[in-house]
Image (cartoon, helix red, strand yellow):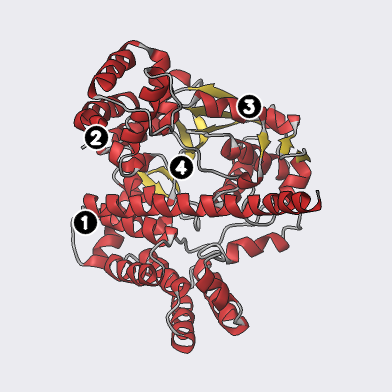
Amino acid sequence: MTAAHTIVPRFEAWLLRETGIDASSLGVNALERAVLERVRVARLAADAHDASAPVEAADIEAYWQQLTMSPDERQALIETLVVPETWFYRDREAYVALARLANERLVRDPMHVLRVLSVPCSTGEEPYTIAMTLLDDGIGENRFTVDALDISARVIERARAGIYGRNSFRGHPLAFRDRHFTALQDGWQLSERVRATVRFAHANLFDLQANAQAPYDFIFCRNVLIYFEREAQDRAIRMLDACLADGGTIFVGPAETGLMMRHAMTSARIPLAFAFRRSTAGDTGAALALTHVATGTKNAAPNAAAAFIAPKPVRASTLDAAPRAAARQPASRAIAPPSTRPEQRIQAARPAADTTLDTARRHADAGEFDEAERLAHQHATVHGPNVDAFYLLGLIADARGHSATAADFYRKALYLDPAHYEALTHLAALLDIGGDRQGAHNLMRRAQRSAAQSAQSAQSAADEPQRSRGFHAARRS
């Protein structure tokens, strides 16, 4: 047992009080490693990652005293724990929905100035994507403001600089980069026009009410609630709701839909946007009735399925330079985007298989579940077990309120690909709604590891051409 491990519970309790974060959600021994790093830097004047620098129990006790007395050290430990993982247009359907809803709001009230909140904003990709989305949809910079908050002063500083590397640009299309960025030697600089629309502030999510100047029309709070323990989740959602304007929309991460259903929130029924609004009495009654029909029970909680697939497709937006008719393509693939996993690249080489599955996705996005289900089953029958087909069938069952069937298909997808991020998060949401918090927690830890591994692979792939150029340059010299 390490010296840190013997007293780590007090650091866990501190982290929970300070940030609301459940230490176990960060991964195995993450907090212990962070404490040891800060002890080496703050107490031993050693390199953070120098494992040869011995850390004794007395060093950690002295560090604990320093931590409790020094706001700067508390911030430094938080910075060590916060690992930004974001990119531009992550979960694009949320931004398609934002553009449509924003225009509808301005049509109803042409004099209104839209207010959008991004919390936590990390290194700025999300709030800047919000700004680019609105600008590209014809909404002038004087018609909206974006507030962006994060607990990490370090990432706020990086966000304000507006300089990004390859890892912030994942997927296609990247036409927005040509419109809004200037190429640098080692990255891209965001335009001043976009940067001027976003106001960054260093703040804890639980300081939100003190920073909110007026109700927000749209709030983006994605992929952070899953790190909180139950009480902190509930408190955060109540605070977000208090900051939401009447008729406003909150966007959350795919694994957080079940958390929103615990509160007076109703899915906005927009495909793959994971958007919610305040429930009305009619919403609550309809949700309970749907659950009763689907499950045969009278008192079951509303099902989160509507957050995954809605009966109507989303109107295309000017998220990229292509005409609106061409912009419909991302929505048709929104349920299961192309994967970079090797086994799926092999499957992608089969045109007939892709055609069938793409057609099934389009039917699912349009709410035509019977046809989508038939085509997905046909695909599996003709081409054999396929992770995308199983995942799609899970989403369809989820949308219909058939939780047990959905969970079975998600598990089949995970049998073929144990690191399938979307299947992991959706199954975790179902388990959480069903009361299996430990099972949901375990799946989310797997999903976090999967996301981290994907990010590392993407970065390695991006760095490879540079390494190759360096190698050839060395050979020439």
Residue at which label 1 appears: 300
From this view, report whether residue 326 is shown above or below residue 71: below
Disc with the residue nearer the chain's start (2 vs 3) = 2
Q: How many angstroms separate mark 4 from mark 1 (CA)?
A: 26 Å
Q: Is residue 40 visible?
A: yes
Q: Position of residue 352 (x, y in %)?
A: 59, 84
Kindly indicate whether the residue at mark 4 contacts the one at mark 2 (C-beta within 8 angstroms): no
Q: Position of residue 116 (x, y in %)?
A: 55, 33
Q: Position of residue 419 (x, y in %)?
A: 41, 61
Q: In the image, which disc is placed on residue 222?
A: 4
Residue at which label 3 appears: 160
Q: Assess disc 1: are there few (<14), some (14-19) or many (≥20) residues with their C-alpha within 10 Å of its C-alpha.
A: some
Q: How many angstroms separate mark 1 from mark 3 (CA)?
A: 46 Å
Q: Position of residue 424 (x, y in %)?
A: 37, 59
Residue at which label 2 appears: 2
- Going by the numbered disc 2, the residue's amino acid type is Thr
Residue at 45% across / 33% down in the picture?
A: 244
Kindly indicate whether the residue at mark 3 contacts the one at mark 2 (C-beta within 8 angstroms): no
In terms of secondary structure, where does tag 3 sit? helix
Disc with the residue nearer the chain's start (2 vs 1) = 2
Disc with the residue nearer the chain's start (4 vs 3) = 3
Label 2 vs label 1, nearer the camera = 2
Label 4 vs label 3, nearer the camera = 3
The answer to whether 336 appears left or right of 177 in the picture is left
Q: How many angstroms separate mark 2 from mark 3 (CA)?
A: 39 Å
Label 2 vs label 4, nearer the camera = 2
From this view, report whether residue 323 is shown above or below residue 54: below
Residue at 48% across / 89% down in the picture?
A: 382
Q: Assess disc 3: are there few (<14), some (14-19) or many (≥20) residues with their C-alpha within 10 Å of its C-alpha.
A: some
